[in-house]
Image: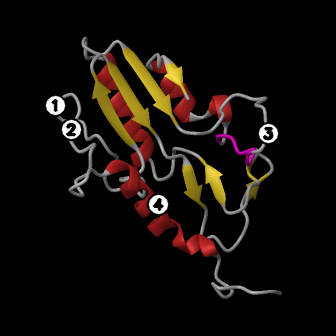
Amino acid sequence: EGFRPFGKKSKLHTLPNARLAFGDGFNRDGEGEFIFHQPLFGNIPSRPFGTPYTNTSFAHVHKNALFVTVDAFELVGDGLYDYIDVEHGFGGEGAVTCTVNGDGKHINWFKRVLRAARNDPSVDHIIVSAHLPIMQPARKVKCSGQFLDAGEDSDFWKLMNKFNVDLYL
């Protein structure tokens, strides 16, 4: 069976700590303060508080542009078993799938941010990144080949269309 430093438990049990450390490394200033903490458009939180994505999804307005980074990687179950939903074409890349739905809080935060931006006359451009292709086919060279569950039928994609997102990365 080989060397297993985590025993029978999957190394994916470290994902919450890895996600926190990764987010902290990129999103905190020299004094340790989270950079993206100011509410947007008066009362919209810049991060989806109360979700596993509090430190890895965020929104920020710079001049006349809204930038939204969305963490779409979701651990399914306890990480011990691979996830695949052949009927719907979800998963298939181990125990992590790619979605922005989760328990609904993450996608609702995203919707509130987009709605507020489109209602604010000072925002001319909305740019969203989630590090995953949505539309197929997508070139798969030296990558995982993962794509967003449900693709163009996902709520995530539909919201970007509804609120006329200018650029998706």
Residue type marked 4: Arg
> Contact, CB < 8 Å: mark 4 with mark 3?
no
Residue type marked 1: Gly
Tell which of 51 and 122 is nearer to you. 122
> Contact, CB < 8 Å: mark 4 with mark 1?
no
Q: CA–CA distance between discs 4 and 1? A: 28 Å
Q: Which residue is mark 1?
A: 42
Dot label at residue 39: 2
Q: Secondary structure at mark 3?
A: loop
Q: CA–CA distance between discs 1 and 2? A: 6 Å
33 lies left or right of 78 = left
Q: Is 146 inside the magenta-drawn segment?
A: yes
- Which residue lies at the image location 80% right of the left edge and 50% below the top edge? 86
- Which residue lies at the image location 47% right of the left edge and 60% below the top edge? 19
Q: Which residue is mark 3?
A: 141
Colouring: secondary structure
The quarter of the displayed image where residue 47 is located: top left
Judged by depth in the image, the label closer to the viewer, 4 or 3, is 3
Percent x, y of residue 119: 28, 17
Q: Which residue is mark 4?
A: 19
Residue type marked 3: Val
Outermost residue, left side: 42
Judged by depth in the image, the label closer to the viewer, 4 or 2, is 4
